[in-house]
Image: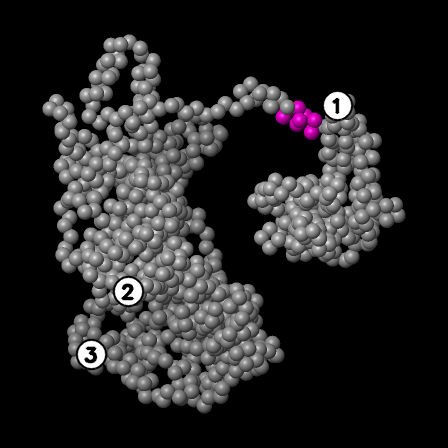
Amino acid sequence: MASLKYEIPLLDRNTRFALWQIKMQAVLAQMDLEDALLGIDKMPSTLTDEEKKRKDRKALTQLHLHLSNEILQDVMKEKTAAALWKRLEQICMSKTLTSKLHMKQRLYAHRLEEGASVHEHLIVFKEILSNLEAMEVQYDKEDLGLILLCSLTPSYSTFRDTILYSRESLTVDEVYDSLTSYDKMKHLVVKPDSQGEDLIVRGRQDRNTDDDRGRTQERNHRGKSKGRSKSSNRGKTCNFCKKKGHIKSECYKLQNKIKREAANQKGKQPENSGEADVVEDYSDGELLVASVNDSKVSEEWILDSGCTFHMSPNRDWFTTYETVSEGVVLMGNNASCKIAGVGTIKVKMFDGVVRTLSDVRYVPELKRNLISLSTLDSKGYRYTAESGVLKISKGSLVVMKGQRKTAKLYVLQGSTVTGDAAVASSSLSDDNITKLWHMRLGHMSENGMVELSKRGLLDGQGICKLNFCEHCVFGKQKRVRFTRGIHNTKETLEYIHSDLWGPSRVPSRGGANYMLTFIDDFSRKVWAFFLKQKSDVFSAFKSWKIMIEKQTGKQIKYLRTDNGLEFCSDEFNRLCKSEGIVRHLTVRHTPQQNGVAERMNRTIMEKVRCMLSNANLPKSFWAEAASTACFLINRSPSVAIEKKTPQEVWSGNPANYSGLKIFGCPAYAHVNNGKLEPRSIKCVFLGYKAGVKGYKLWCPENRKVVISRDVVFDETAMLPNLSLKDSSNKENQKQVEHQINTESTPQVSTKIENRVASSPQYSIAKNRTKREIKPPKKYAEADLVAYALNVAEDIDANQEPSNYSEAISCEDSEKWMFAMQEEMESLHKNKTWDLVKLPKGKKTVRCKWVFKKKEGTPGVEEPKYKARLVAKGYSQVPGVDFTDVFSPVVKHSSIRALLGIVAMHDLELEQLDVKTAFLHGELEEDIYMQQPEGFTVSEKEDYVCLLKKSLYGLKQSPRQWYKRFDSFMTSHDFKRSSFDSCVYFKKNNDGSFVYLLLYVDDMLIAERRDKKGQSPTK
């Protein structure tokens, strides 16, 4: 069989599919069946259909014979060789993103272990590349070569550096060949034994040298190097620790000793030794790699992960500089370069922001400018490389970018800032620099600027203490933080907090609208009183004070309230003064200063809402719920009194919780209405009655409150919504009353009388028939007439033109034109505007014509056509075109008072209306308006109207008219009332008064008639 002849392994999950696929294609090609993999439709047209099918079956059979049972079971349903081939690719070489990600992770994570075979490493690397190629993942050959170099161990650093610095470009094939040759030479070179110890200096160990140097290693029959395993060191003894199993070059004790000596040597250096700390502990073999052979100093900055500090050979670049006498930098070839100084250099980054590199070493012998990534990492920066771009960021802000160049080095995207621009701000003092950045950053806080300065984002300039900034006070001042008030009260009634809550939108069942609370600061016990009016606060406090002081034998010393008039009335102040109670009041609009009482109100109302919701009770029961809430709060632990209960602190005895029930639950009160009547009535539990050993219940049937101690509670259920039940009861009651009124049968009336007489809860006053209240029927048949009149009025309104073009084109165009001419004559007569050219930077206000037709009396008065020129004031800018916009109007109470005076003293009353009132107001601002449509002055079309007086539509027209009217009235000896700015009065010679009331442009005048019966004002 072919499978035996060519020895192709069966395909399973562990088989390298890419190689198996190539071998299988070769087998099918030998049998002339490779066309079957393309599909029957793509086979040569010279074959008949039978030959195509026969060829496909043979190829399918060959594929089946080279599959394992595991794979064959998944592809049994495929009927053609092409379908089977495609299915195998999906199973063994999936091209999904997950498979690609897995294979790429293998590529990047593939590393050569120390001492492992390079040949095996390359085999696995090539396998990964073949799998990626099968998945149609393309890589640049140069990138693959760099990835392969990165996968080598540190012992290959010399090889890696030689490859990178000896050429401008490379491919993965070149790396293959160079690495294979290097590995072969590594095993063939004869090295003297004396290097066994010399190469351990500074931790740079040559792990390829051992005591067997001088011998070439054997080769197996396939030409592969056996390498060195741990078994080769068996029986050998270390010359350092004298232990067996390893040699001196692999001795961990020797390595640790070298590291300790290097660390001790570093610690002996003086702290002020300049740059002695540049050469850190390099026992791990990681040294700086930099070019020292170039004759030209580069102006680029290289981002280097092996560099210890920032370094530059350009002395002119330093903004600040300090000369040092000590310190060297070691190069990759173990050569040393002297450090001449330290300073800062400013670099303009890719985003245009100038940032400062601090602690930069000046090394004249260098040929490259180096930025140390390890230094940036120690300062909290993070760097990532992707797609040839190295990004250095802090948080989410990218501060630097490096571009990978042909030499495989990341070069900074930016330029060095030199000359005067670098030191322009150095002439400013620290205070001025801080103030400058404070204003640049929109008055940022001092802490924010310090944080930016730490990151080096403010051109390397430090931030000192920020001086007083008045603009920050104007823009940012906030209220002073409220500290927690501590009252070191030592006994009850020493300090009392009080507040009035309300008014409630829904009165309680008893008609209360307010809730007055008193809280004892020492025990935090609360008392609640429910009031109908605010004026009841004083009487409630007085009665509570007498009661509480009589019970405890103590006196109230301090009282904390707000500034409400209910607490600051004269009688309240006199009582506190006479009783020696010190008042503590809050500042206006500062309820936080009465925090204990305010927080207690919140706690009470939170419980009220919860209990009413749980009990399905209407809001009118809020007072009962609040009373129960206070009862429970007094028996609940409080943090203010170390988690004790107020009742316990107040009385000294723990509270009893055995009688507590769920608020609003069904309760059955015991009654005795007769031998055959039920022994209980169903009620709702409303709380606990003070001073009575019983429960407070509410009976929905007779709508009364019941106090009883013989009660059975059902805490497993709640009654339905009582508000709905009340309305249904009223409807049922109306139906019953209707039946009683309509039924006239004596038997029925007798039964009803007997039923009423037998009911012990019946009351004639309560259960009498009530008159049904019906809303008045307004406009019974007149509604249609009113509607018709409104529609007719709207139809007539639609006949009025809406603009100038409609007015001159309608049937009444002549009348509308005459009305507009009258309006223009009135405007010119009042000298409303002057025609001027529009100054630069000024805007004009547009205008429009408004038309109104007033219907006259048929047969008596003709209709009137009125046209009004109005300005479009909505385009005016506040503060520029106008300031005040209102016009005071007389109060209705002043009108009623004047009418009463007229009736009492028999005065003459006249009503006046000022025509074109707004045109009399003089403008204070310069307002430019377009010329009216249809009345543009010839040869002055580009002129505009500079308004001298008010015009209808302007925002300030009402205000300017009032100011003009007020100045006129005061000039004629009229005085304005201090209580109503629209009431004017004047005293006549005979002692009588003339009263004038103004409502925009309407006036009422009242005065006494003269002897002839005429008004003197006329």
Which of the pair 101/275 is nearer the observer?
A: 275
Say which amino acid is labelled 1: Pro
Of badges 2 and 1, nearer the viewer stands 2
Of badges 1 and 3, nearer the viewer stands 1
Q: Which residues are magenta?
A: 790-798
Residue 255: quadrant of the picture: bottom left
**In the current view of this chain or complex, which residue is farthest to the right?**
939
Q: Secondary structure at mark 3?
A: loop
Residue 557's mark?
2
User: Real-space Cα distance between discs 3 and 2?
Assistant: 92 Å
Q: Secondary structure at mark 2?
A: loop
Residue drawn at x 12%, y 22% is 676
User: Real-space Cα distance between discs 2 and 1?
Assistant: 83 Å
Q: Earlier in the sequence, mark 2 or mark 1?
A: 2
Question: Which residue, given by chain and number where applicable, does mark 3 sit on?
Answer: 238
Residue 825: quadrant of the picture: top right
- The answer to whether marks 1 and 3 mark residues whose Cβ atoms lie closer than 8 Å is no
Say which amino acid is labelled 3: Cys
Question: Which residue, given by chain and number where applicable, does mark 1 sit on?
Answer: 858
- Locate residue 706, reporting x and y percent: 21, 36
- Locate residue 865, reporting x and y percent: 77, 32
Of badges 3 and 2, nearer the viewer stands 2
Residue drawn at x 31%, y 16% is 740
